[in-house]
Amino acid sequence: MLRTTERPTTAVGVHLDRRPFPETVAPEPGGLPRALVLNASREPLCVVGVHRAVALVLNGKAVVLESDGHVLRSERMQLPVPHVLCLTRYVHVPYRRSVTPTRRAVLARDGHRCAYCAGSADTVDHVHPRSRGGQHVWTNVVAACSRCNHRKADRLLSEIGWTLLQPPADPRGSAALLAAAVRPHPSWAAYLVA
């Protein structure tokens, strides 16, 4: 869908030109597409927007590995919309930046499974409650179903006799990348194996 606006006005409020002109193309309902960037060794590096992905390809710094058939067109060229890119040169990454434990990231790390009953999780629970000094860090946050989260409330596991099915941990490698991605594209699955 193409939106139109009027051209800017002068200081006295008179329109310079009343012809509508295209301002921008409206994004998809889920936002602009994103692309997974792989190092030259095919390990996942990061997720970038489609504009950055196209810039990497046009500058010869990356090649498109996966595309869904959609094409970006200009006057002189056509380029498939990239979903997975591979850099042409190896990039040394000295450290891995940690991912913030957001609700979406915690649910993705735990596979949308409750840490207490293994049911379908839709909420996030702090193992050591924040009201008792617990922090909002990966090792203290788990996915939980609404029922278990409500029953636990602000109590410690030792007070109610519960145990975790699996202790929470920082996501590492491609799991952290997947947890940080807003909506991972299905074509990324082959490249995001732990």
Image: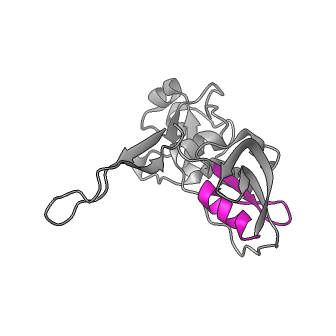
Q: Is residue 52 above or below residue 6?
A: below
Q: Position of residue 80 (x, y in %)?
A: 73, 50
Q: Is residue 166 left or right of residue 150?
A: right
Magenta-drawn stretch contains 47: yes
Residue at (16%, 59%) from the top-left corner? 13
* Residue 122 can be seen in this image: yes
- Identify the residue at image location x=38%, y=45%: 4
Q: Where are the magenta residues, as a range?
A: 34-60
Which residue is rendered at x = 54% and y = 30% of the image? 122
Dividing the picture into quadrants, the one containing residue 88 is: bottom right
Magenta segment: does it hold 153?
no
Q: Is residue 91 above or below residue 186?
A: below
Instruction: Please provide percent x and percent y for residue 169.
Output: 66, 51
In percent of width and height, residue 7 lies at 31, 56
Residue at image point 49% right, 26% down: 146
Residue 171 in sight here: no
> Closer to the camera, 113 or 49?
49
Apparent side of residue 1 relative to residue 170 in the rendered image (left or right): left
x and y, in percent, of residue 49 in the image: 60, 56
Pick the residue in front: 148 or 44: 44
Instruction: State the residue in front, 19 or 36.
Output: 19
Image height check: is 85 above or below 91? above
